[in-house]
Amino acid sequence: MKIVIASGKGGTGKTTIATNLACSIAQMGKEVQYLDCDVEEPNGHIFLKPDIRETHNATISVPEVDTELCDGCGKCGQLCQYSAIICLKDIPLVFEQLCHSCGGCVLVCPTGAITETQKPIGFVESGNADSVKFVQGRLNIGDVRSPALIKKVKEKAANDGIVIIDAPPGTSCPVIEAVKGADFCLLVTEPTPFGLNDLKLAVGMVRELKLSFAVVINRSDLGDDGVQRYCDEENIEVILEIPDDRRIAEAYSTGNMIIDVLPEYRNDFLRLYENISKRNVSHKV
């Protein structure tokens, strides 16, 4: 089962939920893998403290033009929906950061002037954090192709056991890439006007993708009841509420897990997993 932890905005406690859920499940004796797909700023390692054993460079294919063979027909630019390659006065120009590596320009070129070359976008690290298998991606500074790196991280997903995917914040392309193919999505929010606004965007996203989902309200006793009322009106299950507990904030600020510092919360995360498992089974039936 693949469980993705997402949020409409940053700072809601998404990584806190993801890491503590992964460790709680692992302590039950189940096979668990944690994928940090927030490749622009991964921070799950701060809490899981993994032993990194493998590091692989991540590359993508981008077009390279042989100007001696190019006749300036412009078919490549006409095909590309992202303007990653264009012909300007019969001179081909490639904008690598816009390329989505579809390979269409190579296929459409009548003279064989376009080939593909590999460009680095970041790297993927994997290892173990006690009994949790750990994978994370790190995007190169200045690169914008996070969806491509997220795809590389997800290629490391195990075929069995439980996979916890820590998605980037928001509802843009990187998040779509992270949540695709998940069995269940947990949307982490907070009871504030900003939290409610971005939760609505996230709900719209998962509904469009037809994903089974539920909501976790972090710092649930801090703020107004707008999030709860919205979930009630939309018939969305609030599957877990975590109070505004100073001890949790202190554990977070020192890079410690909630379930290690405050063992009484372990049962909350175990019930969360059991609830998701039941929902996932009934959804498939």
Image (cartoon, rainbow, N blue to C red):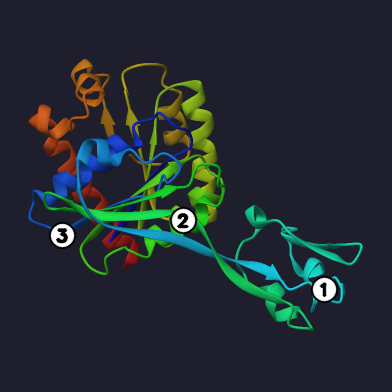
Screen quadrant of the N terminus: bottom left
Q: Which amino acid does label 3 sit on?
A: Glu
Q: Is mark 2 on a helix, strand or loop?
A: helix
Is 120 drawn above or below residue 49 in the view shown? below
Q: Which is nearer the eye, 202 or 246?
A: 246
Q: Which is nearer the eye, 10 or 213?
A: 10
On the question of residue 39 being in view, the answer is: yes
In the image, residue 223 lies at what x, y percent?
A: 40, 16
Nearer-N-terminus badge (1/3): 3
Q: Which residue lies furthest to the front in this view?
A: 68
Separation of disc 1 and disc 3 at Cα? 50 Å
Separation of disc 3 and disc 2 at Cα? 24 Å
Point 20% across, 63% down: residue: 161
Q: Name the residue under label 1.
A: 75
Q: Which amino acid does label 1 sit on?
A: Lys
> How many neighbours does mark 2 have within 10 angstroms: few (below 14), some (14-19), or many (20 or more)?
many
Nearer-N-terminus badge (2/1): 1
Screen quadrant of the C terminus: bottom left
Q: Name the residue under label 3.
A: 31
Query: In this rendering, would 247 be left or right of 77?
Result: left
Q: In which quarter of the image is residue 282?
A: bottom left
Q: What element carries label 1?
A: helix
Closest to the camera, between mark 3 and mark 2, is 2
Point 63% across, 53% down: residue: 97
Point 74% across, 78% down: residue: 113
Is 236 drawn above or below residue 278 in the view shown? above
Q: Which is nearer the eye, 152 or 197?
A: 152
Marking on residue 149: 2
Marking on residue 273: none
Separation of disc 2 and disc 1 at Cα? 28 Å
Nearer-N-terminus badge (3/2): 3
